[in-house]
Image (tube, rainbow, N blue to C red):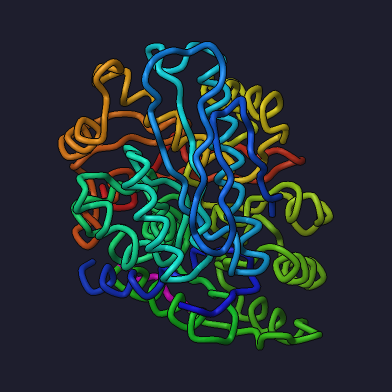
Amino acid sequence: MKKVNRRGSPFWALTAALTAAVALAACGGTSSSSNSAGSSSSSGSSGAASVASSSGNLKGAPIVIQDDSDTSGLASISAVIAQFSVGEKAAAAYLNAHGGVGGRPIKLILCDTAFDAGSTTSCANQLVANKAIANIGLSELWGENGLPIIARAGIVSMNAPVNAQDGTNPDSFPLGGGSFSEFPAQVKYFAKYKGLKSAVVLEDDDPAGHLAYTVLQGIASPLGVKLQGVFVKPGQPDVTPFIAKATTAHPDYIITAASGAEGISWYEALAQQSWPPSKVINQGAAVDQESFLSKLPASAIDGAYFTYEFTSFDDTSNPDVATYRAAMKQYAPNPGLAEFYQWGFANVMTIANIAKKSGASTFDAAKLKSFMQTVNGFPVYMGGTLSHTGTAPATPQILNPNVQIIQYKSGTLTGVSNGFYNPFAS
């Protein structure tokens, strides 16, 4: 768990937890304090958070939400994780500028869990003291060190799922499935709708890469899909021999989790081997326009597929996405062209919509927990739906296992799966 993965995606950590699921069948900039959002910044790796008062003319009691994320401690991955708070602050600012939630402002508190057990515990204690109604963000050690503390106080966790507890603890309710959903979708959707019968899994030659291959193989085998693993040695200056091994196997698709600088080199090498991008499947955490997609020539990326937690940020015909893009432009300011920006924004907006549904004037931690314990069919902002039906047996707390299959074409990400796809529903 303590290894920093060069691929730029924190979801590699899910593979350990996904082993249980197999047995039963998982770069943006840092943020700054924003008074308009009623937020506070963390005090750094200590994990302590300071609280800023809510802004504007809203007079109701604040609805306090705390982001607990590894915004330090994971090198370049922390910069990606920080995208959560950028989206969250934009959502809080948007809501507070439009009357809050029934006249109640959103107060967003940021606490840096720093990929450290002690800091994570400190943030959890701060969350309880701050009387927050929920935890949001992405902290890889939250399940062991933070979740039990807030659960004892009756507060739910919505940590993006990166460990077993996020998918199984009865007080955990992540708004998306991450690799718990994306791994099964990569195999099941493409086997059912895109003719996938064989694939090369292109991964780093390290324990996480080999475990990811094992997990994917466990999903593929019952479907009769044949997988071959090709593992690239870390720090390899020339990846051509590894890419050649992948392409000369002549699979239907190549499945990978490459992003950032490493992903760029892999995709370019695939293009040099004349491998079509339309035969590459990647995860949503790789979808980052600034640091990845825009850095590749069309010959290397045009047509590539991704499993994705939300409606594409390019689909502004969707009213949620249109609001998101406008709010990010006005309050971030940042175009928000990455999955984790969307996830952060969706965290705050979905909680606000739950508050409106539950009765904003009396909405508190207990009401949020009660809602999440019984929800059936409630929409995640820009995402699928929260329901206690259609979940995976091994991860019953992931109430929204739905993903979209999106394709990057001519500089735009387009949904190709006719809405959201639940890999556990069929």
- Which span is picked out in magenta? 223-227
- Residue 273 relative to residue 186: left or right: right
Residue 224 belongs to magenta span: yes
Where residue 263 sits, quadrant-wise, is bottom right
At horizontal 19% and vertical 42% (from top left) the residue drawn is 388
Q: Quarter of the image containing the N terminus?
A: bottom left
> Can residue 90 be seen here?
yes
Q: Position of residue 248 (x, y in %)?
A: 66, 80
At horizontal 71% and vertical 50% (from top left) the residue drawn is 29
- Residue 409 relative to residue 134: left or right: right
Q: Position of residue 301 (x, y in %)?
A: 74, 55
Q: Position of residue 267 (x, y in %)?
A: 73, 66
At horizontal 57% and vertical 66% (from top left) the residue drawn is 257
Q: Position of residue 193 (x, y in %)?
A: 44, 50
- In the rendered image of this protein, does residue 242 appear above or below residue 350? below
Observer-nearest of 14 and 371: 371
- Residue 142 relative to residue 307: left or right: left
